[in-house]
Image (cartoon, rainbow, N blue to C red):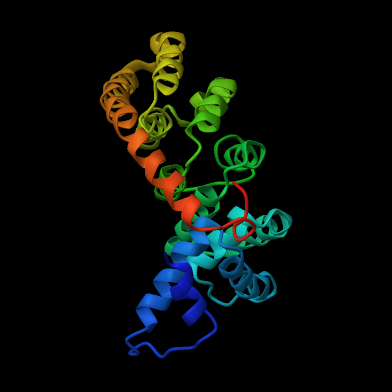
Amino acid sequence: MLIPIYDLTGNSTFDDYHPMAEIAALAHYILCKAGYREAVNRARVEFDEWLNDPKEIDGGNMWAVFRWVDKEWESGLQRAIDLLHNETSPDFRRFLLSQLMSSTVQPDKLERLLMMMLVDKDYVFTDAELKAALAAIIDSHTFLKFITNNWEPIKRRFENRTSIWHYMLEQATKKWKTQEGYELVSEFYKTHKEKLGDAAQIVKHSLQVIKNNKEGTYRNIPTLETWLDHYLILNDTDGLFYSM
């Protein structure tokens, strides 16, 4: 539905007050999120400039390239690390971390970021920076698995930083919406409940949230799948999008 709008406005430059400016920007942003090749390739132009120049970059363009263009991820990560070592602006650091975490869905890459943030002592982050990053994670499965596999070093490092420790456990356990997620979090709780202390209540609350969410998920998915199947039959999108 947005592709015709993007095709009409994508190569145009509007000033901020033009009536089409907001529509064009919104179409570009949403299609970048969806992996529309033309929009992502346009985002790569600004991203490639950002790699070599400390200019500002649109968050949507950064996210799109980190998410969809695999070969740019490594160079982008190194650029981000360099900036994190030297950048003192709290707002920019939170912005950069949240863009990195929310756009990284490959498990091995997400584990590298989590290792850097939660285990590797060469990097130091404030609670606010960690909260911004952890809240942005999409892949709850890899996140929870990482905490499980690195339980001892993570617990030693953060259990006395109560605010971020509780927040970390909440973010790793509450976002699930399926029976599989409920079972994984239940197993995590059974394994670690004796060592969770006050945080045990957070995981128990997450289990209740998941139980409520999964009922709505199973009720609504058939309707969404039917609509999507019908849309794809009527609209040939083959080759227009990056694959998930």
Q: Residue at x 55, y 83 (%)?
A: 11
Q: Quick one: quadrant of the N terminus? A: bottom left
Name the foreground residue: 144 vs 80.
144
Q: Nearer the viewer, residue 232 or 76?
A: 232
Answer left or right for 106 relative to 19: right
Q: For residue 50, which quarter of the picture? A: bottom right
Task: Residue at 64% x, 44% y: name it.
Answer: 122
The residue depicted at 47 percent of the width and 47 percent of the height is: 133
Q: Is residue 43 above or below residue 203?
A: below
* Position above or below: 194 against 140: above
Q: Is residue 192 left or right of residue 198?
A: right
Residue found farthest to the front: 234
In the image, residue 62 sits, relative to residue 185, either above or below, namely below
x, y percent for residue 23: 37, 76
Q: Position of residue 195 (x, y in %)?
A: 42, 13
Q: Is residue 71 visible?
A: yes
In the image, 160: left or right of 147?
left
Q: Position of residue 178 (x, y in %)?
A: 39, 25
Q: Position of residue 222 (x, y in %)?
A: 36, 33
Vertical relation: 192 (above or below) 27: above
Viewer-side residue, 150 vs 163? 150
Q: Horizontally, is 178 left or right of 69 in the view?
A: left
Q: Is residue 127 something that shows in the picture?
A: no
| Total numbered badges shown on the rendered structure | 0
Task: Classify residue 185 by image quadrant.
Answer: top left
